[in-house]
Image: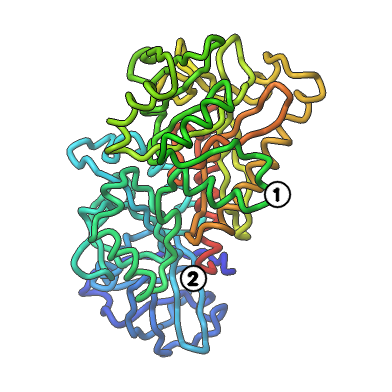
Amino acid sequence: MSKKKITVQVMGSGILQDDVLMVGEKLLKQLKLQTGDSVQLVFGSFRREITAISVPRYDGIQLGSGTAHSMGILSDCTVRIQYRPKDRTLRLGPLISVLISQDYPEQYDKPFGKITQFCRELSSACDKQGAYVYFFTPAHILGNPGRVEGWVFSNGWKKTEFPTADVVNNRLTSRKLENKPSVQQFMKEVKSRYGSHVFNEKFLDKHEVFDALKSSGLLRRYLPESHLLDSFAVFKRMCGQYSQVFVKPVRGSLGKGIIRINKNADGSFTMLTTTTGSPLKQNYPNATKMYTSLSGKMRTTSYQIQQGLTLIHHNSRPVDFRALVQKNGSGAWNVTSIVARIAGGSHFVSNLARGGTLSTVKDAIAKTTLSAAAKANAQTKLKTAALKIAAGIDHAIPTHFGELGIDLAVDHSGRVWLIEVNSKPSKNDNTALGDVKIRPSVLKLLEYSCHLTGF
């Protein structure tokens, strides 16, 4: 893996021809090239035959402005370089792209809305470690899969045209956008034509995850009983077997539309449904009438029904845990962070969008009724579960993931359970507590991108 970093300087077209690459004398020797050698200059999907010429007393490379424009590369950026004599290929990179849902060009300070800070951090990390990153939306995908429009940071955000990147990180937060034919065709073609690595290719459905993981004996211990809610028979059995069940939209997010059903001592049921305000409470005399009330929703939305858990509480509020698990510079899963999420007010879900708050695992666990031994082992158990579940997802679901948000719960006995897996973990929800200039999660993303590309 090459970690040789160089500075790229762009020269005016009247100064340097576009078929010439000026290379510092020392660097030329390190690459085992000679002045006058013809090489294939590669930057993502960009390729051009070019002649390498030695420059005395200079450490980087110099490009003509026409070549630089075709590459989408700006002057004075820092990238890594490697030369493969076998095919005379001189690669610059890694070229990384992040596919995001929307941009806001009129908002100079926040052109990418809530994830602007993440984009700025990744740009800064790439600049320091020798990589090049740009950000683009589905609207920026051009007719030619080898070219896209996008944004790069260099003393401010600049929009230009780029080659398809070595790595595409799919950060789309809308299933509708992700399923657009233009987006699906783009991801298919960049992989087949240019060998681009596309990771976090798709959203995960709740039922898909539980159905895939239950075949593993190692993972079944983390799985509450869960079924696709496709019949009254399934509904009636689950409501009869457990004192509490959850009904969740298979494709839901941010805690929207989650229903908690409690079985009362007299055989009746109480249903709580998440709303933007306090949960909506409804009572039903039996499972039949309750199922009938749900039937309308089930015509347009697929639901999963899941065994309820007796979660630990923090100051009388349910608490669960979000583990951010990412692949590192060796391609192995690592736990980047685990935070506790405490339900807010009268809510029974802990999502921040529903008034939940963050805490460190240590502080949240300390204020629960767990035994001293269970408290001491909780963090280790959560980490172990997160890593095993991530590996299980890799094994059971044939899609490339580089990071996962894994929501876990701990019951009163200290046992760890899986709540759900999110393939598009929020860059706000998952931050470790404290003010960090470049978050560890951003550095891990860069490390994995370098691993994928061989830089």
Q: Residues within 10 Å of mark 1 (few under 14, many from 20)?
A: few
- Residue 386 percent coordinates (x, y): 63, 42
- Residue 291 percent coordinates (x, y): 38, 27
* Up/down of 431 relative to 212, above or below: above
Residue at image coords 45%, 78%: 90
- Residue 338 percent coordinates (x, y): 60, 34
Residue at image coords 44%, 23%: 287
Query: Which mark is in front, 2 or 1?
Result: 1
Q: Is residue 426 visible?
A: no
Q: Residue tagged by mark 2?
A: 81
Rendering colour mode: rainbow
Residue at image coords 68%, 20%: 365
Kindly state the secondary structure of the residue where label 2 is placed: strand
Which quadrant of the rendered structure holds the N terminus?
A: bottom right
* Up/down of 353 relative to 196, above or below: above
Query: In the figure, residue 352 lies in which quadrant?
Result: top left
State the mark number for residue 193: none
Given residues 237 and 351, the one toward you in this image is 237
Query: In the figure, residue 415 lies in which quadrant?
Result: top right
- As measured in the structure, the alpha-carbon distance from the residue carrying label 2 to the one carrying label 1 is 43 Å
Task: Identify the amino acid type marked 2.
Answer: Ile
Q: Is residue 273 left or right of residue 394?
A: left
* Up/down of 184 relative to 232, above or below: below
Q: Residues within 10 Å of mark 2 (few under 14, many from 20)?
A: many
Total number of numbered labels? 2
- Residue 329 percent coordinates (x, y): 60, 57
Q: Is residue 189 left or right of residue 448?
A: left
Query: In the figure, residue 424 lies in which quadrant?
Result: top left
Given residues 229 and 288, the one toward you in this image is 288
Kindly state the secondary structure of the residue where label 1 is placed: loop
Given residues 226 and 8, the one toward you in this image is 226
Q: Residue tagged by mark 1?
A: 218
